Each structure stands twice: as structure tokens, then as C-alpha cells.
Amino acid sequence: MSSSSAQMLISMSLYICIVIGIGVYFAKRANQNSENYYLGGRSLGPWVAAFSAEASDMSGWLLMGLPGVAYWCGIADAFWTAAGLALGTYINWLIVAKRLRRYSHVAGNSITIPDFFSNRFHEKGKVILTIASAFILVFFCVYAASCFVTCGKLFSSIFGADYRLMMLCGVVLVVIYTFLGGFLAESASDFMQAIVMVFALVVVLVMGTVNAGGLGAVIENLKAIPGFLEFFQIADPVLDEAGRQVIAQGSPLFGPALGYPLLSVVSMMAWGLGYFGMPQVLLRFMAIRKADELVSSRRIATVWVLVSLLAAVTIGLVGRALEPTAFATKADAENIFSLLASTLMHPLVAGLVMAGILAATISSSDSYLLIAASAFSKNLFQGVLHRKANDSQVMVVSRITLVVIALIGALIALDEDSVIFTIVSFAWAGFGATFGPLMLFSLFWRRTTRAGAIAGMLSGGAMVFIWNYLVKPLGGVFGIYELLPAFLVSSLMIVVVSLLTPEPEKAILDEFEAAKTFEC
């Protein structure tokens, strides 16, 4: 290992020790009962709620996936995705957060998303609970895999070590950390990690821009690439038979710019719809100590997201200007952030910046594992299979489930050619279409019925698979992001089936009204 790699390892190791220390600190409180372990006893302050929600949401794709997209084909895809995410973040905090905080308390003091849906419709058969938990297990396995891919790419690019070995080291770190402290440790460390993430993004952006000769020089350099800086066109890298970008006379080759129609813009903006169904974000709404503090949280979260997304997209553009031939494939292009950090900074500082990627990965993967574990242990094991199970039994099953989910995620992540952005986009669509429409209708339409909820979840989740694997490959107008059609189909099914079935019973309607003004 070189001297610079060793220094980066020192910085990152110190950071990891701090993260694990947070887990140890909160371990005793987290293990008092399942509500503390899964929801932190509803004790989050506005800053922690905001920062932890966004850090767990953005994950490593913010520092690797999004800059990689901008580096590979220009501003259009990355910008419109970021715009959709920023808008979705604001609207979610604005209209969903406070109502969910109140309603989750009114509906049987729900501590998980499947719990809330099941209690909202006064289920006895637990069908909604089972379906919601099953979808969480499926899509969080995929989500966890994206985080493990990030760990593998990060460590292998820094230390020149085997990808799979480095990926498995990341898995072990995440499991140990999540095992210790539960939701409180996760949220507290996510607060710190959100700060590290935005620090890393801003520092790399500033250093990269300065070394490229300023923003003006970057723009002039990239103007030579057809469609690279256009919002309604997209650059088209010329690839050889092996799928690698062709380099001629020291410069990467691009074909004529491709069109980027309005349908593509809408497709990328549809990323914002995913927020309404993201368990890791929705749980922060449920966990804040007072509903009124969500106003402050909304402002904090929105500013953080705007700064972070803008920096991430711009880093990809600056990276293409500085290192035009560094990466020949779309998968490799996701290393542009780590390349700039390691080449432009002192190794100790670079190590801290690299910890920003690790921060993003840990903050997301611990959320995914914890929510998936709760879906099985709290919702399926205690809620359906063994209703007399006590808290200690639930906690044991939760930790076993956590390890199993991590192993499945690791198996998915074994392919080092995986594209983080692609993996995340599928899981994001899954949650957005399965839970997003149902969350909105559950909170704001009193006429929503249990049958409508079941139809909405099943149709939304199924359409994500159908569109992605059967319809999207047809191309053309069918090439849109699967979240958009799946979200619309789910919404339509909820409305149609609810109107065709009897109105909810009076107790459910009374709870719906009580949630509007409940003080908490």
C-alpha cells in the first residue's frame, strides 16, 4: 500500500471508529424495547430528523451514481433527475410529514410503515401488513446491494484491492453498526454523516473547478462535446465492440447529440414521486418528537438537498473536463468523485472526503437493513406468525433477519460491473409505486378502502417489474422510467377499487378526521 493510500485509510478508519462509537453509545437505550430500536421512541429533533432523512435517502449514489451519470452523458439526465428529487423532497415534507406524524399516532401508535397501513384500515387478517412487509424485504435487498456495490467500488479504487473482498468488508461494517444501536444510533450518526457528505461534495467541487481553470474554462471545454451541456439533448459516447468508449488522439469520441424530448424530462422528474413511498424518509416523519417541528425540518432538508444535488451534478461535469479519458464505461464513470478527491487533495483530507462516500453508504444501508428487519420480525413474525412473541424474541429475530438480508444484498452486489444508479432507480421505483400512492390516499382521501389499498400495492409493485423487464425494452415512448406508469396504475386501482367497494366503517372515518387536528 502506498503512503497516500495509508494516510487515506487512517482518516477513514478514524471516521469508522466514531460511527461505531455512536452505535455503542445508543445500544443500551435502543435495546430497551422494539419501539426504541425501530423508531427511537419518537424523540428526534428537527435538525436530526431532517439530516438523517436526507442522508439515509441519498445514499452513495449521490456521490458516485449521480456524478457518474453527468460525467458519462452530460447534464440532461442528471439535472432533470436532481430537479425531480428536489421538488419531491420539498412537497413530501410539506404535505405528508405532519399528517403522517399525527395519523401514525392515532392509528394504534404505529412504529413501522406496514404497521401504519394495517392499523389505518383496522385489519384483522393482516393482508396489507403481509404484502407491505414482503415488498419491503424484496426492494430493500436490492437497495442494500447498491450500497454494498458503492463500498466495493470505493475501497477497491482507493487501495487497488479486490472488489469483492472490499465489498464484503463494507457489508461486515454496516451489519455490526446496525446490529448495535438501531434507529437512534442510525439517526444520530446520519446527522453527522449528512454534514460529512455535503462537506465532501462542496470541497471536491471547489478543488476540481479551481484545478480546471474555473467554471468558465470547464464550460468552454465541454462545449466541444455535442449535447453535453444541453437540457434537451444528451451526449452519445462512441463505444467499441467491448462496450468501452473509443479514445482517438487522446480524446474521447462522441457521436452527434441525441434528442431529449419532453417525455424524457417528465420521466426523470418522476423520480420525485418516489419520496411519497420511501420508508427510510417516512419513518423520520413518524419519529420526530413534535409535529410542529417539522416546519423547521422541511426548510433544513430542502436546503441540504438543493446544495448536495447541485454539487453532485456539477462534479460530474468538472470531472469530464479534468479527466476526459479516465473512465471508458458507464459503470467505471461512477468513480469520478473518488478520483478527483484522491488526486487533488492531501491524502488525509482526501480520506475525510472519501469518508463522505462511506457516510452516505452507511447512512442508507443501515436504514435499509433496519427497516427490512422490522418488516419481518415486527410485522410478519410478531404480527402474523407468532402474535404472542415478546419484545426480546422480536429483537432476536430482527437481528437474524438483518444478517440474512445483508447476505442476500451481498450476493446481488458480487458483480463489480453493476451500475449504482441503475440499481437504485429500480428499488426507488419499487417503493415509490408500491407505497407512494397508498400513502397519499391513506392520508388525504377518507373514502380509501382496505380492498383499494391491497389493489394499489399489488398493481404498483407488479407494474414496476412488468414495465422494467417487458415494456421498457421496446424503447421509444415505452422507454420511460418505470416509476411513472407504475405510480399512475397504482393510483388508478386505489380509486377504482375503493369506489367499487363499501365505504369504510365509522371508526375508521372517525380516526381519519381525528388525525387532522391531533396534537403530538
Image (tube, rainbow, N blue to C red):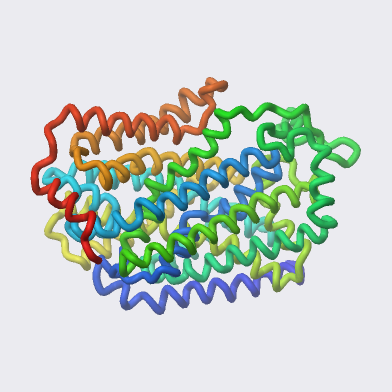
Q: Residue 379: x and y, percent?
A: 23, 53
Residue occupying image coordinates x 27% and y 64%:
396
Q: Position of residue 239 (x, y in %)?
A: 74, 31
Please count the marks in the image: 0
Give whichever of 312, 269 is nearer the camera: 269
Q: Is residue 71 above or below residue 232?
A: below
Horizontal arrangement in the rendering, residue 96 relative to residue 143 (left or right): left
Relative to the observer, which residue lies in front, 364 or 304?
A: 304
Q: Residue at x 52, y 39 (%)?
A: 269
State the residue at coordinates (16%, 60%).
Answer: 389
The C terminus, quarter of image: bottom left
Q: Quadrant of the N terminus?
A: bottom right
Left or right of 304 in this view: 429? left
| x and y, in percent, of residue 278 in the image | 39, 49
To which quarter of the image does residue 307 belong? bottom right
Toward the viewer: 299 or 210? 299
Q: Residue furthest left?
A: 506
Q: Quadrant of residue 99?
A: bottom left
Residue at image point 63% right, 59% down: 155
In the displayed structure image, the side of residue 350 where residue 106 appears, left or right:
left
- Residue 158: image x %, image y %? 69, 60
- The answer to whether residue 172 of the structure is visible from this angle is no
Q: Is residue 379 visible?
A: yes
Residue lying farthest right? 249
